[in-house]
Image (cartoon, grey):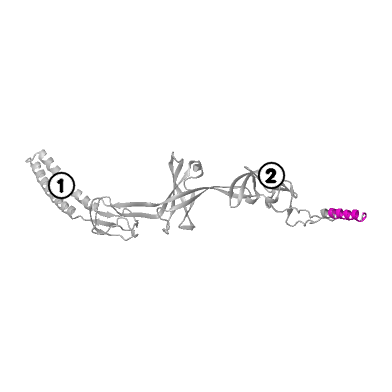
């Protein structure tokens, strides 16, 4: 027993040492490497705007009167000068007839006095008095004609009318809305941008607008006017763009998301997955042979899955684009196509 126990312990030690020698070694991480190239980055101004009609007017009753006729259909199109509605004018026509009769009488009397004045039988004062009476009678007739004209409501321009809310025979007070006429052949899109972005836009620049009603159809237009005054409360400037609206899909009052392409530039770019952060600093892993070295970089804007690189690396320099989470500074890496490493070490005798 004294001889067997030492031999048994020695065998156990040899077996333990042999197990440690045969423990598998960790393989170098497999990564994807690509050279840094340039990409196009676009500066954009994003805003939210409200659609307005090219021209819009609310036609209201000029006086309190009874509606005789309504000459438009709900949501129908009216031409410029078309009669929208007429109001009762019987009293005004009677007043016009009386004024016209007085005007004729005053005109005839004026002619007789002028003839007498020419022969020396009338004074200049009587002639002036009759001339004033004739002019007053003519003005009264013109006033009656204007009152009749005011009671005929016409469209000031061609456009689409709103839904009808009045009916013939109703007596409406002055100021009551009869119809809203909107010219939507094109749309005015008003939006605001911060004054800090004012230098990025100018008149004539193209814009893209998207409506929630038509999310898959962008509407394109141009900036027409930039308000010369900045709102001192919001420090924002109002911008107006014009959008063609031949298919009448855009309606006044719609909310649209606006995107203005301000400028484009070519810059170095890397995929977003290639950039790692450490506090406020940003790094990429540049490849030196098969060694990954962490390099601090200065980044710009992010766009389409790419990050703009403003400094720290050079064009064409190979960097790790996939697998950076497995790396540390100075780590050895493996590329696709490399020969696989041996997973175990040979047992030592």
x%, y% of residue 333?
74, 51
Q: Quadrant of the N terminus?
A: bottom right
Who comes first in sequence, dot 2 or dot 1? 1
Give residue 91's position: percent from left, percent from top: 17, 53
Crowding around mark 2 (Cα neighbors within 10 Å: few <14, some 14 to 19, many 20+) is some
Left or right, residue 185 beside residue 281: left
Residue at the spot 39% in from the left edge and 55% down from the top edge: 184
Label 2: state its secondary structure.
strand
Q: Secondary structure at mark 1?
A: helix
Q: Position of residue 38 (x, y in %)?
A: 63, 49
Q: Main secondary structure of the magenta part?
A: helix
Image position, residue 317 (x, y; %): 69, 48
97 or 294: which is nearer to us? Answer: 294
* Disc 2 target residue: 295
- Which is nearer the eye, 241 or 180? 180
Count of labels in the image: 2
What residue is at 15 percent from the left and 47 percent from the top? Answer: 137
Marks 2 and 1, Cα distance to the nearest angstrom? Answer: 96 Å
Queried whether the magenta region covers residue 345, the answer comes back as no
Which mark identifies residue 137? 1
- Of all residues, the one furthest to the front in this rendering is 1
**Residue 88, quarter of the rendered image:** bottom left
**Quarter location, residue 159:** bottom left
Task: Name the outermost residue toward the left.
Answer: 121
Q: Is residue 337 left or right of residue 148?
A: right
With respect to residue 155, does 329 lie above or below?
A: above
Give the side of residue 108 with respect to residue 231, left or right: left
Q: Residue at x 33, y 51 (%)?
A: 57
Magenta span:
2-17
The quadrant of the image that shows the C terminus is bottom right
Is any atom of residue 51 visible in this view?
yes
Q: Is residue 14 magenta?
A: yes
């Amino acid at each position: 027993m004294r001889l067997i126990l030492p031999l048994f312990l020695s065998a156990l030690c040899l077996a333990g040492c042999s197990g440690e020698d045969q423990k598998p070694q960790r393989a170098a991480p497999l990564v994807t490497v690509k050279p840094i190239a340039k990409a196009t980055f676009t500066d954009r101004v994003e805003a939210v705007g409200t659609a307005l009609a090219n021209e819009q007017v609310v036609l209201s009753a000029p006086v309190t009167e009874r509606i005789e006729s309504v000459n438009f259909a709900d949501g129908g199109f009216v031409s410029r000068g078309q009669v929208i509605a007429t109001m009762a004018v019987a009293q005004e026509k009677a007043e016009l007839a009386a004024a016209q009769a007085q005007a004729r009488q005053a005109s005839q009397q004026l002619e007789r006095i002028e003839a007498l004045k020419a022969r020396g039988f009338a004074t200049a004062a009587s002639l002036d008095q009759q001339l004033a009476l004739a002019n007053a009678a003519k003005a009264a007739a013109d006033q009656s004609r204007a009152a009749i004209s005011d009671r005929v409501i016409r469209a000031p321009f061609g456009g689409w009318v709103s839904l009808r809310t009045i009916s013939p025979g109703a007596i409406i007070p002055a100021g009551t809305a009869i119809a809203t006429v909107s010219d939507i052949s094109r749309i005015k899109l008003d939006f605001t941008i911060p004054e800090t972005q004012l230098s990025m836009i100018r008149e004539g620049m193209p814009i893209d607008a998207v409506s929630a009603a038509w999310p898959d159809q962008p509407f394109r237009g141009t900036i027409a006017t930039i308000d010369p005054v900045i709102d001192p409360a919001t420090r924002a400037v109002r911008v107006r763009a014009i959008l063609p609206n031949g298919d009448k899909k855009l309606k006044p009052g719609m909310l649209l998301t606006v995107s203005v392409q301000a400028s484009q530039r070519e810059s170095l770019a890397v995929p977003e997955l290639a950039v790692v952060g450490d506090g406020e600093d940003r790094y990429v892993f540049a490849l030196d042979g098969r060694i990954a070295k962490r390099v601090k970089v200065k980044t710009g804007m992010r766009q389409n899955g790419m990050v703009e690189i403003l400094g720290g690396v050079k064009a064409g320099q190979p960097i790790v684009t996939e697998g950076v989470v497995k790396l540390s500074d100075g780590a050895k890496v493996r590329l696709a196509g490399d020969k696989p490493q041996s997973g175990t070490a040979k047992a030592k005798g």
